[in-house]
Image: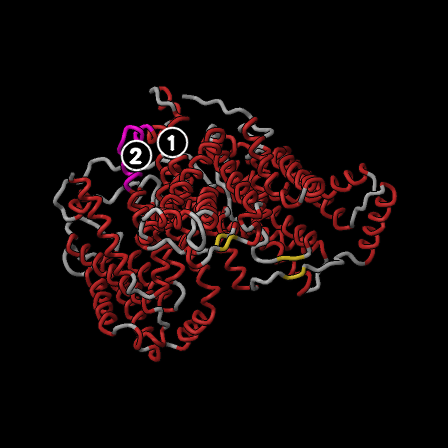
Amino acid sequence: MARLALLVLTAVIIGALGKISEFLPGYLQTQLIYIGINIILAVSLNLINGFAGQFSLGHAGFMAIGGYMAAYLTVNYGGFTGPGAVSLLERAGLPQALASPLVFLIAILVAGLVAGFFGVLVGLPTLRLRGDYLAIATLGFGEIIVHIISQIEELGGARGFSLSSELQLSSFFWVYAWVALTILMARNLICSSHGRALIAVREDEVAAEAMGINTTRYKVIAFVMGALLAGVAGALYGHYTMYLHIDDLRFLRSIEIVVMVVLGGMGSIAGSVVAAVILTLLPELLRTFLGVASAAYILLIGAVVLPVRRPGHRLAYSLAVSSFAAAALLGLAAFITRADVGETMAAAPPLLLWICAAAGLLASSSMLLPGPRTRDALSRSLLCLLATAIMFMLLFRPQLLPGPVIELRAWVSAKLPQLRMVIYALLLVVLMIARPQGLLGGHEITWQSFRRLLGRAPTPTHGQENTSS
Amino acid sequence: MSNLSELAQLLIQGISWGSVYALIALGYTMVYGVLRLINFAHGDILMVGAFVAYFALTGWGWNFLPSLLLAMLVCACFGVAIERFAYRPLRRQPRLAALITAIGLSLFLEYGGQLTVGAEPRPFPEDLFTGPTGSLLHGASGWLTRRTGVAITAEEIVVLVSALLLMVALNLFVSRTKLGKAMRAVAFDRDTASLMGINVDNIISLTFFIGSALAAAAGVLVGMYVHSIDPIMGLMPGIKAFVAAVLGGIGNIPGAMMGGLVMGVVEYMVAGYISSLYRDAIAFGLLIAVLLIRPTGLTGKGMVEKV
């Protein structure tokens, strides 16, 4: 009963958030949808890569199968524009408001099942391979799948598959309901005996086999579940963009999903979610100069302040974290207003900017507050102060800065369309070198971890160290 | 044209294109051998090499050979720098972290290329060979064409000869010199090699040096063969060459050469006899078939698992 109530509550919350999201600017709504789809993809791939330890590079292939399958169904049999399932259901007495979501749901489920079926087809033979050979075999399958799709005329061939605008069925509610379902399914799988078996296979395949685990069976289970959810994500994607093209669903997309999984932390569902959010928003954030500046600022503050975490520094640490969050807020402001530096004052609420400025100052001085005043803390603090000063001069009083900085700013602003992906790639490299275990490194975000952060629960003696072969 | 000469024609084209794949695959396989790392940025080093040669040829009016050598040298240093700053900090970390850095670097080089030289494809200069070399080459091409009845272009001769020379040189280096021996030792067992007094860091740098130089040479050959270069030109040959390296058994130098040749010939055969639309699909299908029959590639040795 409690579980049912929780499910209903989740649905209601997602519905309410969906209604709220309708007040956001259009491009932000789009980004929210993409975030949701990427979360499904990353979490489902994490089942294969992170938990079962099988390195797959063909996830986009299953996404393509799901996307094309669902689109084919709704276009040809859906009856959203002509005779078909929806009109049949309506004739049977079902109101249109119910009939069309029902048909869409069936299309998604069929797409997921077909993708899962292909998961069995691909997984059964290839999962005998190990390590990089498996990666290449899955990459090959992904490529073969899209090449075959591009030869099918009913699916638009190499031109791509366009859907009419009535078929934009994916909405915030649909996507995030599936996100919740995906996370729930992944969590339940991991916490079951199946999940333990998967982790055993990841840690040591030979030992797992010796313990009586049918390794092939569990690997295929993880693979199929990942493929099924990727198919669902593809169906949601196709019915949002209303256009499917194989070039968007090839190995570059697979690699993008792998990056999310590894950056978030292999074998951490929360990590995949966080990384999916960051990696979807980051290229968008870097579209404006304000965004680039705030990304640089966040990175700098993060790099300088966050490593300082000693006992006795708790207040300093929490201050630093809160000011870090404020710096992130500045980035968010940049993102929401999409303002370039000249328009900042007009577009962003000035109050927000001043709050951010104050938070930046706080970040700088928080190192000085309690605890031992070491030279290290002093220099970190001064560095933050300098960065904050430059940042806000850049935003509020650019005329005070020396000429070369202004020129640099102008150059960056002018070159942004090309520069942003360069910065994105560099950030990826830097993040990975800074945190090789991934952002969350195999840990999960749970209520317990919040309590631990507040000092109300004992820290575990052994961390969930993540090893990958 | 008779069936036989058509076959010979496709074979020649396949072998020369395959030898380009083989050159790229060598870099993948060598790096994999010493680091167990799929160097995703390798295909983009190829692109850098092609652009260096392009600017040397068109901007400074250099000849083909010096441009090729310059491209190889620049890329070799570039590859060493990449290893030093992006891969070495992660050497003791999970292998996937280095893989993601490699992907990041690959994106960096592609978008950086678009930033600096623009995204539009540029025509790679044709008629690179003038003077005595040119007349010699064209003469040879004409003679071969007349003698065998199979059209062999001057470019194909250059591609074949330079790829062959580089591969022979590499084979001699790896099998006959002390450094080559050290490289094999590092690939075999890094820790033991370092106990035997081999400077592992230097050997890894050397591996990147050679691999990137070969990639640059391949880049120039691709540019010459396709007549067009752009910042993402390394992507597809890179992936295909990697597939070729796996096909031959990754980490294995003769395997990479064989894999590259097989890949090139199969692609041209499929394009010639079936349809160029299925070229990639069949190439990947072949890969999967080989992997399912021989899970460690054509020349791969079965791994003995110790528990």
> Which of the two residues, B19 or A11, is positioned nearer the viewer here?
A11
Which image quadrant is residue A27 in?
Answer: bottom left
- The numbered mark at residue A221 is 1
Magenta part, dominant SS: helix
- The numbered mark at residue A339 is none
Tell me whether circle 1 and circle 2 mark residues in contact (CB < 8 Å): no
**According to the image, label 2 marks what residue?**
A189
Dot 1: within a 10 Å radius of its alpha carbon, few (fewer than 14), some, or many (20 or more) residues? many
Spot occupied by residue B78 in the image (x, y as percentages of width and height): 54, 52
What range of the chain is rendered magenta?
A184-197
Spot occupied by residue A71 in the image (x, y as percentages of width and height): 45, 49
**Quadrant location, the N terminus of chain B:** top right
Left or right: residue B223 versus residue B290 is: right
Q: Amino acid at mark 2?
A: Leu
Label 1: element kind: helix
**Quadrant location, the C terminus of chain B:** top left
> Which of the two residues, A170 or A373, is positioned nearer the viewer here?
A170
